Amino acid sequence: MESFELIDNFFQIVVLLCAAAAAGIFALRRRSRDLLILSLAYACFAMGTIYYVLYLVIIGIWPQVFYVAEISWLAAWLFYLSAQILRTEGMKCRFSLPAGATAAVIAAVAFLDHDFGPSYLISALFSLTAGAIMYLSVSHIQNGSLYRKRDFFMIICVMLQVLLYLISNYTHDYTRFQLYYAVDLALTLSMAALLPLTLREVKRA
């Protein structure tokens, strides 16, 4: 039984489910689409991890091919993309070369590394989603958005997710704390940090 893997994943489930509940409550109180989308993103990511943990507990090994978890995680990133698209309302959309270059690099690395499993379809969908999130986030910062911290954290989340899969290629022992878990914990906390940043933005709107 992968001891620290269970600790890491249980931590992620608890944090993201709590964040999903909090975001949902604030969404209802403030009638905010931003917070509702964020709540759904948290819930999808947590459900993917729940499947992963249940498989690990019941079968005793981590799933070699786990499309249920991957699809749920992909749905979470699509919700994150939706949140970034929603924030472009009222902005002048001009092509940004730096944002485009950054997005292309992230998308290429994610696809070539087969992030989210061996399926080319899932890898392509995630790479395109990650690239689009990166492009919009960098563009918002370049356009002088008043809420740059949220965009910075979104960029950090995307980069940590891609980095996590890169590190997993060189990780073989999941029983001890190591760089893989440090990155995964940082990813979980970075996602959770989007909630107070989004709430602050909604309050000022």
Image: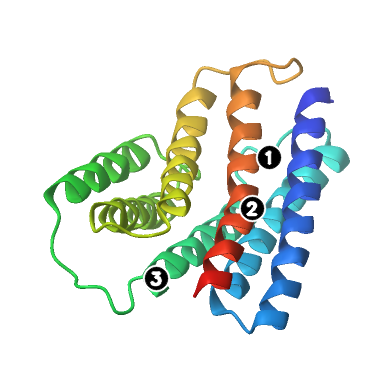
Mark 2 or mark 1, earlier in chain: 1
Mark 3 or mark 1, earlier in chain: 1
**Image position of 114 (left or right of 13):** left
Residue shown at 81%/49% (left/top)? Answer: 14
**Image position of 12 (left or right of 162):** right
Mark 2 or mark 1, whichever is nearer to me: 2
114 and 23: which is toward the camera = 23
Residue shown at 13%/61% (left/top)? Answer: 95
Pointers 2 and 3 in contact (C-beta within 8 Å): no
Q: Which quadrant of the view contains residue 59?
A: top right
- Residue 69 is labelled as 2
Residue shown at 51%/17% (left/top)? Answer: 170
- Residue 63 is labelled as 1
**Image position of 185 (left or right of 112):** right
Residues under labels 3 and 1: Cα distance? 36 Å
The kind of residue tagged 3 is: Arg
- Give the secondary structure at mark 1: loop
The kind of residue tagged 1 is: Pro
- Give the secondary structure at mark 3: loop
- Residue 87 is labelled as 3
